[in-house]
Amino acid sequence: MRIARFVHHDQIAYGTVELDEDRGEHPGTVSVLTGDPLVTAVQFTGERLLLGDVRLVAPVLPRSKIVAIGRNYRAHAAEFGHEVPEEPMCFYKPNTAVVGPGEPIVYPRQSTAVDHEAELAVVIGRICKDVPVERAPEVIFGYTCANDVSARDFQHKDGQWGRAKGFDTFCPLGPWIVTHLSPAEASDLGIRATVVRDGQTIERQDSTTANMVHGIAELVSFVSSFATLLPGDVILTGTPEGVGRIVPGDVVTIEIEGIGSLSNPVVAADA
């Protein structure tokens, strides 16, 4: 199932998305749900809308936290001259960094070196603490695409990543949450990033989630060992090699096999 959060007639709602590949009776539509599926039990309202008639927004707006994992792909750590840590390296991104599909990434006035980072995002579905690895699937609501946008100059200057990773708009999520994948299935998906600049497509990241050092269930267990996870919390699982600069005027797209694609234009802060 794909669960989207969308705007229609100035109202935000949730719905399940049907695509051509599903070979169902209503491709290219969204079936409207009552309420927020991360908070309460929902039902179908019976209303069905064309995808083209709604505006997708971030499929989850974390009420609590976004926990991101650094250096979780060996080749990405190597391209920056780093070793892979024995335990997952964690940092936080504020929920004010979240934007949805098509919404702009705002290039900060203070920075001159902003990169994209394609990542698989894990959405937590229930309150949990100290989750054993084997029980991690029970607390995962689903998966979506993420872009861990990073101001490299501040990352190097500050010696820690709070400001570099925490600017408003620095965490695009979308286009929807896929709920039918198991952690094992989500751990073997192609992940790509491309940038369109001046009409030309630049191929950047092209890897697979199978290259993660610490797997999905391990990450959920590790993060929950020190922080209580709440419904709607997001864990970003790290990025593969091939990260690169983005500049105002670019459109960056993150694509994950079996989930979808997330595109965002880059705009100057004073645009």
Image (cartoon, rainbow, N blue to C red):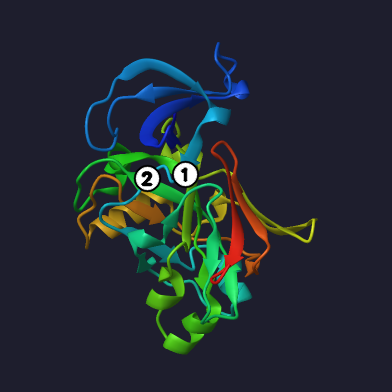
Locate residue 2, reporting x and y percent.
Answer: 46, 31
Q: Tell me how many marks there are.
A: 2
Quadrant in which the N terminus appears: top left
Camera-side residue: 198 or 118? 198
Camera-side residue: 153 or 51? 51
Locate residue 28, reporting x and y percent.
Answer: 58, 23
Mark 2 falls on what kind of element? loop
User: Residue at point 80% right, 56% down?
Assistant: 199
Q: Is residue 212 left or right of residue 126?
A: right
Residue 202 visible? The answer is: yes
Q: Which residue is mark 1?
A: 144
Locate residue 131, reporting x and y percent.
Answer: 23, 49
Contact between marks 2 and 1 (CB within 8 A): the answer is yes
Q: Which residue is mark 2?
A: 60
Camera-side residue: 268 or 125? 268
Q: Which mark is residue 97?
A: none
